[in-house]
Image: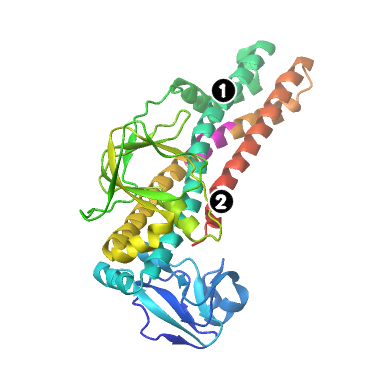
Amino acid sequence: MKKARERSSYAPGDHVFLQGEVVDSFFKVTSGRFAKVYSKKPVKELGVRRMLNEADLVGIATHEQLFGEIEALMGQPQGFSVFALDPSSIEPVPADNRDALQHVFAVDPRVGVHACISFARYMKQFFSYFAGIAREEVELEAFIRASARDYMAGVNELAGIVCPALNDPDLTAAREHKAYETAREILRQAELKRHSNASVACGVVSYVGKDVKMQTFRAGSLLCKEGTIGDKLFIIAEGTAEVITGGSSPNIKIDTPGSIIGEIAVFLNLDAEVPDMRRTANVVCTTDLTAIVVHLSQVEEFFLKQPETMTKMLMAMVNRSGNTQKFCDNSERRLKDLLYKKLGILLEGLNSMAKRLSGRQDKIALARPAAFFAQRARAVYNRFKDCLDIIARKSTIKT
């Protein structure tokens, strides 16, 4: 990990850090402007001088704004390079020292609020991507089962047309293709998976002070209502709530004292001229629940008085983002396995049979299975491309 630079003043064209570096601090702009730029080519290949001219502009950070906070707090390589556009200055904020970070928040709580807003913006994008990946995983499994049935149906229809079936080269090729055994295995394992509610800590503040005002909610109460403006966040002191996911997915149980509910919408609304960020799901109390309730208008004052709680909330958001990334990585791996180890093989089999049968002139009756294999091959190919497009959306997430 690279230590933050000691210097605070930068001339136009100077870089604070380069894309791919891991730094131990993030930065608050105290004067001037800094450009955040991204390059598809490695910095080593372009060189620092060409980076600013050839890279794409991600954004410009000006007075009091932060940059580099997401990656620094998560200990990850920076996703962009930062260059000064004017004679400019910055103040480093330590990301690897909890006590030092808390001290910064105590002196300037707006830094903590801005960092929380940044994480809320990032988490909203990432959770949206993760939800798309998880949804595609379920839907793709169903599509693969249907495609396996189609392949077997096409083979069976072919077997009923050709005679003698045992000696037909195309039927033999269909049964010897890897797609045949893959389809049989998919259909053998086509059974419903059992789900149980997953318990998660939605941003854990490990200690809730006794001097703050608590509110009690009865079992069955609605903490957050889908579609309504996110105007308050909840820090659980005692009790259990569930995020209602709907459909076949399990509800998400939140049962750890200190867990935070509703923070993303609140911080995003805090940064908006007109609050319009709405809840994306219902959250219901499954037991009697006691929580701190912080209204949108009270957020800054609440954390101004409790910099320790702000530090813990920010680090909880960091941990939650890291855990979600791990879940997302697992879903991506499973999705790619479905694509390349199952759907891709079925695509090869369907396309192979479409080509083989379209070239046969011995039986008019083979036109139907030939057209069937061709139509299903096109459908599978299109679904394959759509799934790759969903995976590619990860590159659009901005920090």
In three-dimensional space, the C-alpha distance between marks 2 and 1, rounded to whole angstroms, equals 34 Å
Q: Residue at x 65, y 23 (%)?
A: 170
For the residue pair 147 and 14, the one nearer the viewer reads as 14
**Residue 177: x and y, percent?**
56, 28
Amino acid residing under circle 2 = Ala
For the residue pair 351 and 9, the one nearer the viewer reads as 9
**Residue 258: x and y, percent?**
27, 49
**Local secondary structure at mark 1:** helix
Q: For residue 163, say whether it is visible.
A: no
**Residue 300: x and y, percent?**
39, 63
Q: Is residue 166 left or right of residue 198?
A: right
For the N terminus, which image quadrant? Answer: bottom left
Task: Look at the image and give the residue range highlighted in magenta.
Answer: 337-346
Q: Can you tell which quarter of the image residue 21 is in?
A: bottom left
**Residue 236: x and y, percent?**
29, 45
For the residue pair 47 and 229, the one nearer the viewer reads as 229
Could you say which disc has been placed on residue 392 in the image? Answer: 2
**Local secondary structure at mark 2:** helix
Q: How busy is the neighbourhood of tag 1: few (under 14 within 10 Å), some, or many (20 plus)?
A: some
What residue does disc 1 label? 175
Which of label 2 and label 1 is nearer to you?
A: 2
Q: Residue at x 37, y 77 (%)?
A: 92
The answer to whether residue 165 is magenta is: no
Q: Can you tell which quarter of the image residue 188 is in?
A: top left
Above/below status of 316 relative to 152 = below
Amino acid residing under circle 1 = Arg
Q: Main SS type for the magenta part?
A: helix
Q: Residue at x 55, y 85 (%)?
A: 86
Among numbered discs 2 and 1, the one appearing first in the sequence = 1
Above/below status of 91 relative to 396 = below
Q: Residue at x 52, y 53 (%)?
A: 394
